[in-house]
Image: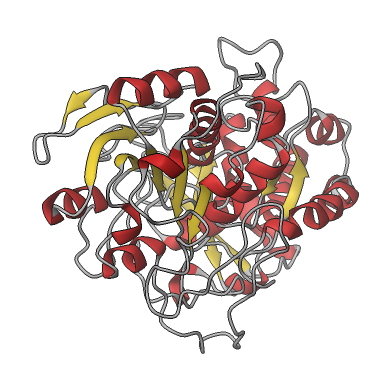
Amino acid sequence: MGRNHDHSSTAGTRHSGVSRRGLIAGVGAGVAATPFLGGVAAAAEPGHGHGRHERVVPGADAAAADGWKPLTGQRLGVITNPTGILAGSMRSIVDEMVESGAVNVVAVFGPEHGFRGTAQAGESEGTYVDERTGVTVYDAYGANADKFAEFFADADVETVIFDIQDVGARFYTYIWTMYQAMAAAVRSGLDFVVLDRPNPVGGKANGPIMTDGYTSGVGLDKIVQQHGMTVGELARFFDGEFMPRVAGGRLDDRLSVIKVRGWMPDQLFAETGLRWVLPSPNMPTPDTALLYPGTCLFEATNLSEGRGTTRPFEIIGAPYVDYHWAAQLNKRDLAGVYFREAYFTPTFSKNANEVCGGVQVHLTDPHRLDAIRVATEMLVALRDLYSDFAWRTYAADAYPGQWLDKLTGSARFRTQFEAGAAADEIVAGWRTELAAFDRRRRPYLLYRR
């Protein structure tokens, strides 16, 4: 990353008669043509109140309905996982593409957890030949732009496809896989197509922004903790804001987004009519995704964040926690949630095989939920109630609490917290930067806020 490479695109001479600017317009009835980066934001779909949205059709289904025509005549490399399915058949887009015979899939790139989803957190499936399709699957978890460029060259990829269900949080690694692949595509002169999907937590941005010195695999660049964009919108944002610096140029009209039909950013996943497929082993339900932008912060503590239970990121606790925590939290009357006193024994990860006291966070009104505010209140109450509360320590950490700094994007949250700040003060710390980010992302949005 960061090195300049000068590559001229040969996409126009390789491909069979479909221009990049014509891609969106040619896919699926009712999919409006949208301008690419450098233009104004795309026209939004007509808005409706909650529960009155038209049927939601992901980008992959729109492309398949058109016989994958915009992708024919190209050597395709597909970045996907078990969420990259067609809503009708519930089958992998790779399986469907290969069996259709309409397109030429020459490679698949598996992110964290793998293409078929067999690996746990922080793991991948390795590189192998997929038994069903005969296509080589490259292990892309943790791959930087240089590695992706090697993969693309090895498979002689001409167009990169990205189709993964994101969950809307900066520290969910799939968006950074896309970021690195985009940088490689810029340097290699390749086309990049995003088959867009809904953001399951909606279109509102929230939380602190990533800052210099705190970037990592769970946050490579300056977006806020809950980014409030689809992966298609993020790709546009990455291309306009980050690629000139990290890749020495932009994709511009070599970036295409096949939009979701019928989705509006005030709509949560449970309202889309789509079936939830686990994006990762510890993201079992849409409710988990709603809480995750906040409760993932418990990864940085000595509490179990619910890994090793059936409700990770909803059930939180530790052996030293008792009923006082739930009682204290419910006194705060936080919008959209209720805290049930809970006891559980994680089967793996932190506090494995130990009885933990804690809470289960129940959603009472998902549209009023501020997950990051909720997690902040939970942490402050823990600090004030229990002397055993501590940061989780990792061997690679330079200091206690470094993982929290990476998750929140700076040392500010932690230093305020350790100084005894109330939740109101901590949350107020990111309001100005959040407003600035919200303005910055507007030119790249595809669905009306």
Image point (59%, 38%), residue name: 298
Q: Is residue 129 above or below residue 226?
A: above
Percent coordinates x, y for residue 110 in the rendering: 33, 33
Q: Quadrant of residue 290?
A: bottom right
Image point (17%, 34%), residue name: 135
Q: Is residue 322 above or below residue 336?
A: above
Residue 341 visible here: no
- Give the number of callouts: 0
Q: Quadrant of residue 307?
A: top left
Quadrant showing the N terminus: top right
Which residue is at the far front?
13
Q: Is residue 338 above or below residue 281?
A: below
Q: For this view, does 58 lie left or right of residue 392? A: left
Q: Nearer the viewer, residue 322 or 419?
A: 419
Q: For this view, does 301 lie left or right of residue 38? A: left
Q: Quadrant of residue 391?
A: top right
Q: For this view, does 211 lie left or right of residue 203? A: right
Image point (51%, 23%), residue name: 145
Quadrant showing the C terminus: bottom right
Percent coordinates x, y for residue 230 in the rendering: 55, 57
Residue 439 visible here: yes
Percent coordinates x, y for residue 189 in the rendering: 50, 31
Percent coordinates x, y for residue 439 in the rendering: 82, 57
